[in-house]
Amino acid sequence: MRRRSFCKLLGSLAAGSLVHGVTETHAALFRSPVTTNRLRPPGAVAEEDFVGRCIRCGRCVESCPYRCITMLDIRQGVHAGTPLIAVEQIPCYLCMKCVKVCPTGTLRPVAQEDTRMGTAVINTFTCAAWAGVALCRTCYDVCPFKGRAIALHELLPKVVPEACTGCGLCTHACPVTMDNGLKAINIEPPTEGSRS
Ligand code: SF4
Ligand code: SF4
Ligand code: SF4
């Protein structure tokens, strides 16, 4: 390849990767932090409306007696300053103090049993009970809606998604932690229309 063509090719490659890098950075600034075990507090409006309604006052963070809510930092782009709960670290005990202090209705009043922060999902390959390595039923024992949100069938725990609040007490208590930080029972964020 002649020198001039080679330089031209290098130039286009560099410009292409620069554009790709800028697009990726731009996308990261807007990407929702809500994912497995990373949830909004109870009563949250739809995730697409959250960032525009929350005024980053931090009252929910201050009101939580369990210190389970953290305020996201500037690495979270447009979501910086909004509240998030890492349930495997500290779950939500459904005391409902945060929803009472939110001044903008971003967290709306909701009954404990009607809260839908997400839904617990058991990994039947890593769960000690399902894998047959231990008679564990910790998730069942700690669930505030034991028998409704999580039931035992022939000594195996099964989540009832319709009644699960997504509080994460089960995730926090589960004794199995994988290398990637996930437990044998994890909370998946709500799908559109199922949050409260
Ligand atoms: S409901 Fe209570 S425990 Fe849960 S996030 Fe709000 S203040 Fe914290
Ligand atoms: S199954 Fe887990 S997330 Fe669902 S209500 Fe019970 S403890 Fe909370
Ligand atoms: S606490 Fe974890 S390991 Fe124990 S039964 Fe529940 S999901 Fe399985």
Image: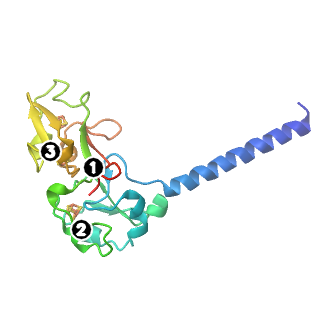
Q: Position of residue 174 (x, y in %)?
A: 19, 40
Q: Position of residue 29 (x, y in %)?
A: 52, 57
Which residue type does callout 3 highlight?
Ala
- Foreground: 154 or 2? 154
Disc 2 residue crowd, few under 14, some 14–19, many 20+, Cα 10 Å = many
Q: Is mark 3 within 8 Å of ligand 2?
A: yes
Q: Are marks 3 and 2 in contact (CB under 8 Å)?
A: no
Alpha carbons under labels 3 and 2: distance apart:
22 Å
Which residue type does callout 1 highlight?
Gly
The first of marks 1 and 3 along the sequence is 1
Identified at 33% across, 51% down, the residue is 38
Task: Find disc 3 in the rendering and name its residue.
Answer: 149
The first of marks 3 and 2 along the sequence is 2
Alpha carbons under labels 1 and 3: distance apart:
12 Å
Tell me which corner region of the image, top left, top right, bottom left or bottom right, holds residue 110.
bottom left
Identified at 18% across, 27% down, the residue is 130
Q: Are marks 1 and 2 in contact (CB under 8 Å)?
A: no
Above or below residue 154? Residue 121 is: below
Alpha carbons under labels 1 and 2: distance apart:
16 Å
Task: Find disc 1 in the rendering and name its residue.
Answer: 118
Q: Is residue 162 left or right of residue 195?
A: left
Q: On the rendered image, what quadrant is the N terminus found in? A: top right
Q: Secondary structure at mark 2?
A: helix
Disc 1 residue crowd, few under 14, some 14–19, many 20+, Cα 10 Å = many
Task: Find disc 2 in the rendering and name its residue.
Answer: 99
Q: On the rendered image, what quadrant is the C terminus found in? A: bottom left
- Foreground: 6 or 130? 130
